[in-house]
């Protein structure tokens, strides 16, 4: 595609090349040895090779420019953000002002090279009385008649030249360094800077101001300039007032604030917690602080000027003049910034306040104004401050826990008179609601019969509670059911009768192969369900034993010194198999487990082995099938326990989602959304088990009729679970079985990546 270099690369500014037959998009990436890289051959485009008749057939297409003469980049790219700046003035006539025929107004002319536009602006001057700023907005300006069909160009601008922009004539007197160098490169000679004429209006105002100052001395004190200069600038000093000599006196820690805008002082007191002082921290409100306080001033005594009665006569006919000489004016008796320094004392209405330190802004202010460099704080103040800290009220010490209730309840009874219930982490409850980790465990006991009992330990992430359920085994002599109610479990071997809160079991404490002690019962965790393993692998930063990257790094560190000997020793356990059309080397889970235990010993646990085998499994990941009748019984038991009977509303919700889906099929995501929208009391694990048992089509959609039938215990009854008054949340617990699974041995070795490293060292 060809385009005009003066126009941006936008639709409508491009033209098809004559003779072009292929309109595909250029390829900039190639693959070499399975690696994606940038192509070596440069593609034609902006900044690429120019067209030339000697370059071959692909470069012999017609062009807008002669061979080897086209610009590398268009002007809007070459001169982007490049602006020429000229200084000048124009003369404005003022016939309505006496003795000022005209005035000179200085301007700045900007010329944008990318699109040949111009902009004229006038620098703002304080209290000029003239609306200043942008005089001519950025645009292309036509020349005066009779050349009004052309636009003002760069060649019309130079020092000592006049240019007419619309109805004003501007005289250019100077330019910046960039403009001078740019014009010189173009071959344009730039003269030296010209002088700007004197403005009569400015000279007239200076004469009037001088005459006013000479004839009439200023009697008004103008503080606006000081306010504008020092507004919101405050000098901050640290100080103290020692009042321990008086009865029940104390050492008061103060903060002195001096406002530079109006020379006022404000003092705040830093009150310690539970000090018992009836004060809001304000030691002295903002105002001018006198050095020596004798009496309250009378009305009109502190006025900035004094009025002299030259000729009496009451309010009518009298003559009054301000006292410009200052007869009878007393010396300034107020503290100023020059009276404040570290180590100085100030009199605050009879209280001696000592300044001890200041902030960084105050140091910079005195360093710039007075040249002071010594700002070391007073050493003696640290001793007094330590004494002041010792006299502060200590933090309340709670009594030891006595065993009644929980630690949180005991703290609430000791802190406040009216105890409040402990607050729960509501954000955590919303995020992890119905997110439970289930583990299979066996009891370790001195009694032989207890070692054959199987339990399901459920950890609730929403509130860090644990429940233990015993699965009933026929002819075992144990009834089964709830073994431990849901509660937070204490970590064993800790003293709970202390003021500090005890440690409870966290989700990281439960993993395959560990032993936990729950209420004096010891359990050996042997397996878990797929949801728990997937959750821990997803959040592997919080569960380091499920972090496959760390496990591989541990194996790499232990295997590096003996890599070749170890691999050759266990090569007989690797069996080649064809899986999904690919021939790979595989090992069984039991063989890999023995190899890892031989390599690492006690440094690796069962949880790490299972996570590693799940990551490098050679078999396709298929979900374990659940017993549909068992899942149906569990759902009916849960609906009966929660007294749920809102099937019609569920049908109505499904009809609103898709009117044709009541007798058809629906996406599993919509089914899960319906369960949450209609508040069907099913947790995540039971919902997942139900989704596995519902009928599916070839697209993976679920049958809506089967979903409604499983929620209707009256139409299709099933065998109830016993007991119905206890939430049977583990009847569908299916432990993850990894025995006999095949592990991709080649993929594991590639992840360890020691073969290439040893090859590089050898070479």
Image (cartoon, rainbow, N blue to C red):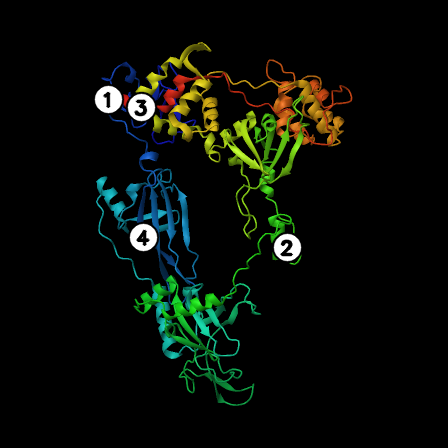
Total number of numbered discs in the rendering? 4
Q: Taking 274 as reference, is 578 above or below it?
A: above
Give the foreground label among 4 and 3.
Answer: 3
According to the image, label 4 marks what residue?
Answer: 88
- Counting residues from the start of the chain, the first of labels 2 and 1 encountered is 2
- Counting residues from the start of the chain, the first of labels 3 and 1 encountered is 3
**Which residue lies at the image location 25% right of the left edge and 48% below the top edge?**
177
Q: Which mark is residue 762?
A: 1
Give the foreground label among 2 and 1.
Answer: 2
Give the foreground label among 3 and 1.
Answer: 3
On the image, the x and y values in percent for residue 535 come to: 53, 30
Q: Secondary structure at mark 1?
A: helix
Q: Secondary structure at mark 3?
A: loop
The residues tagged by marks 3 and 1 sit, at their Cα atoms, a distance apart of 15 Å
The residues tagged by marks 4 and 2 sit, at their Cα atoms, a distance apart of 81 Å
Q: In which quadrant will I find the C terminus?
A: top left
Callout 2 environment at 10 Å: few (<14), some (14 to 19), or many (20+)? Answer: few
According to the image, label 3 marks what residue?
Answer: 562
Q: Which mark is residue 413?
A: 2
């Amino acid at each position: 595609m060809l385009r005009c270099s003066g126009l941006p690369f936008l639709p409508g500014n491009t033209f098809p090349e004559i003779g072009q037959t292929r309109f595909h998009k250029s390829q900039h990436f190639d693959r070499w040895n399975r690696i994606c890289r940038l192509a070596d051959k440069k593609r034609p485009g902006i900044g690429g090779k120019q067209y030339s008749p000697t370059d071959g057939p692909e470069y012999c297409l017609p062009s807008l420019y002669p061979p080897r003469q086209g610009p590398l980049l268009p002007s809007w790219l070459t001169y982007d953000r490049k602006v020429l700046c000229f200084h000048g003035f124009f003369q404005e006539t003022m016939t309505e002002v006496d003795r000022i025929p005209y005035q000179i107004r200085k301007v700045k002319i900007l010329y944008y090279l990318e699109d040949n536009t111009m902009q004229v602006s006038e620098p703002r001057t304080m209290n000029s009385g003239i609306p200043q700023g942008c005089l001519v907005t950025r645009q292309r300006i036509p020349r005066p008649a009779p050349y009004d069909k052309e636009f003002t160009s760069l060649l019309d601008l130079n020092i000592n030249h006049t240019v007419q922009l619309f109805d004003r004539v501007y005289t250019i007197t100077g330019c910046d360094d960039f403009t001078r160098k740019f014009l010189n490169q173009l071959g344009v000679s730039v003269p030296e800077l010209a002088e700007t004429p004197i403005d009569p209006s400015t000279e007239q105002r200076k004469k009037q101001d001088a005459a006013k100052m000479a004839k009439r001395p200023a009697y008004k004190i103008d503080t606006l300039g000081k306010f504008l200069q020092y507004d919101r600038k405050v000098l901050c000093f640290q100080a103290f007032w020692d009042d321990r000599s008086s009865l029940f006196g104390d050492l008061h820690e103060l903060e002195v604030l001096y406002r530079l805008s109006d020379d006022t002082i404000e003092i705040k007191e830093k009150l310690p917690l539970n000090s018992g002082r009836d004060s809001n921290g304000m030691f002295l409100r903002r105002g001018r602080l006198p050095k020596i306080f004798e009496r309250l001033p009378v009305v009109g005594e502190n006025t900035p000027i004094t009025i002299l009665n030259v000729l009496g006569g009451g309010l009518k006919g009298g003559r009054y003049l301000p006292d410009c000489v200052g007869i009878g004016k007393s010396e300034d008796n107020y503290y100023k910034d020059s009276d404040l320094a570290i180590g100085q004392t100030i009199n605050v209405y009879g209280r001696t306040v000592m300044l001890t330190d200041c902030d960084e802004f105050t140091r910079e202010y005195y360093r710039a104004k007075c040249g002071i460099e010594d700002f070391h704080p007073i050493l003696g103040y640290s001793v007094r401050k330590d004494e002041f800290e010792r006299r502060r009220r200590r933090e309340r010490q709670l009594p030891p826990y006595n065993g009644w209730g929980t630690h949180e309840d005991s703290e609430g009874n000791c802190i406040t008179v009216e105890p409040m219930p402990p607050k729960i982490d509501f954000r955590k409850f919303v995020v992890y609601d119905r997110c439970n980790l289930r583990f299979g465990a066996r009891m370790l006991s001195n009694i032989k019969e207890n070692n054959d009992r199987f339990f399901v330990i459920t950890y609730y992430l929403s509130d860090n509670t644990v429940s233990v359920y015993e699965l009933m085994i026929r002819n075992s002599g144990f009834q089964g059911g709830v073994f431990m109610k849901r509660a937070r479990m204490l970590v064993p071997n800790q003293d709970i009768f202390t003021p500090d809160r005890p440690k409870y079991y966290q989700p990281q404490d439960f993993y395959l192969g560990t032993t936990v002690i729950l209420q004096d019962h010891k359990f050996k965790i042997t397996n878990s369900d797929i949801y728990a393993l997937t959750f821990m692998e997803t959040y592997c930063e919080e569960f380091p034993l499920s972090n496959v990257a760390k496990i591989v790094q541990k194996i790499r560190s232990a295997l590096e010194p003996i890599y070749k000997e170890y691999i050759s020793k266990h090569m007989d356990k690797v069996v080649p198999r064809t899986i999904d059309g690919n021939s790979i080397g595989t090992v069984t889970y039991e063989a890999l487990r023995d190899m890892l235990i031989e390599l690492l010993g006690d440094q690796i646990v069962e949880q790490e082995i299972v996570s590693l085998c799940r990551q490098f499994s050679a078999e396709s990941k298929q979900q374990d099938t659940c017993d549909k009748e068992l899942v149906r019984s569990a759902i009916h038991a849960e609906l009966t326990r929660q007294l749920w009977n809102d099937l019609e509303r569920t049908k109505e919700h499904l009809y609103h989602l898709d009117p044709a889906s009541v007798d058809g099929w629906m996406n599993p995501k919509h089914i899960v959304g319906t369960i949450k929208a209609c508040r069907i009391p099913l947790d995540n694990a039971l919902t997942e088990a139900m989704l596995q048992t519902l009928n599916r089509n070839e697209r993976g959609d679920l049958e809506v009729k089967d979903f409604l039938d499983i929620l209707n215990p009256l139409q299709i009854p099933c065998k109830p679970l016993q007991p119905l008054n206890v939430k049977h949340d583990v009847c569908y617990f299916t432990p993850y079985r990894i025995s006999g699974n095949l592990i991709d041995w080649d993929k594991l070795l590639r992840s360890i990546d020691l073969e290439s490293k040893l090859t590089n060292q050898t070479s």
